Image (cartoon, rainbow, N blue to C red):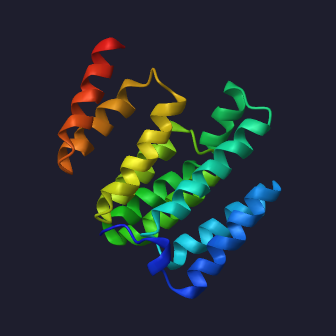
Amino acid sequence: MAELPLEEAPRKVRELFDKGFAAMERGNLDYAIDMFLATLELEPRLLRARQFLRAAEVKKLKSGKSNSLTKGVSTLQGMGGIASVNMLIRKDPTKALQAAEKLMKINPLNPPFINLLASAAEACDMPEVALQSLEIARDHDRQNIKFVERLAALYQQVGQTRKARDCYEEIARI
């Protein structure tokens, strides 16, 4: 599936995106996240909405008091969701992607959630979504070689060999 530019999205989708963007500018991150999620439920190919969604989620996470305990708790919170998304990936990849987005709302930097979202995106034939999520994860955790390896493999899969090579060089440096 190819990315859909905002200008080509249906009016309802653009309205939801605009509400989310305005809420994000005002600092109302919870509402912005909800609006971006609603946008993506209607149009999952709108990568721009996903980009702003992830930015709002990360900003919300960083503004709270986060430590290793809260990261562990977020994984425990999402355990049931992880199992259901794994089952949905085979049966209904689009619903799996939506469910994975809800897990990302809990903690957008949680490695199991990111890997699950990437798997769901690949199952939906949306490697752009997987790449976007893995790039954000890599930017926030430069030492996680698994993210960089998966990113390199995806870059190769979509024919972006230069970026794949950069990832492999990054792995060698780490």
Q: Is residue 139 left or right of residue 38?
A: left
Q: Quadrant of residue 5?
A: bottom left
| Residue 21 pos. (x, y %) | 68, 64
Q: Quadrant of residue 37?
A: bottom right
Can residue 37 be spotted in the picture? yes
Q: Which quadrant of the rendered structure holds the C terminus?
A: top left
Q: Height in image: 78 above or below 10?
A: above
| Residue 132 pos. (x, y %) | 43, 49
Q: Which quadrant of the rendered structure holds the N terminus?
A: bottom left
The residue under the point 35% across, 56% down is 128
Exactly how many numbered labels are in the figure?
0
Q: Quadrant of residue 65?
A: top right
Q: In terms of depth relative to the viewer, which is nearer, 54 or 110?
A: 54
| Residue 59 pos. (x, y %) | 70, 43
The residue under the point 40% across, 65% down is 88
Q: In terms of depth relative to the viewer, which is nearer, 110 or 51?
A: 51
The residue under the point 29% across, 31% down is 149
Q: In terms of depth relative to the viewer, which is nearer, 31 or 124?
A: 31
Q: Is residue 1 left or right of residue 27?
A: left
| Residue 40 pos. (x, y %) | 53, 70
The residue lying furthest to the front in this view is: 7
The residue under the point 45% across, 33% down is 138
Q: In terms of depth relative to the viewer, which is nearer, 113 or 145?
A: 145
The residue lying furthest to the bottom in this view is: 11
Can residue 77 be spotted in the picture? no
Q: Is residue 134 left or right of residue 70?
A: left
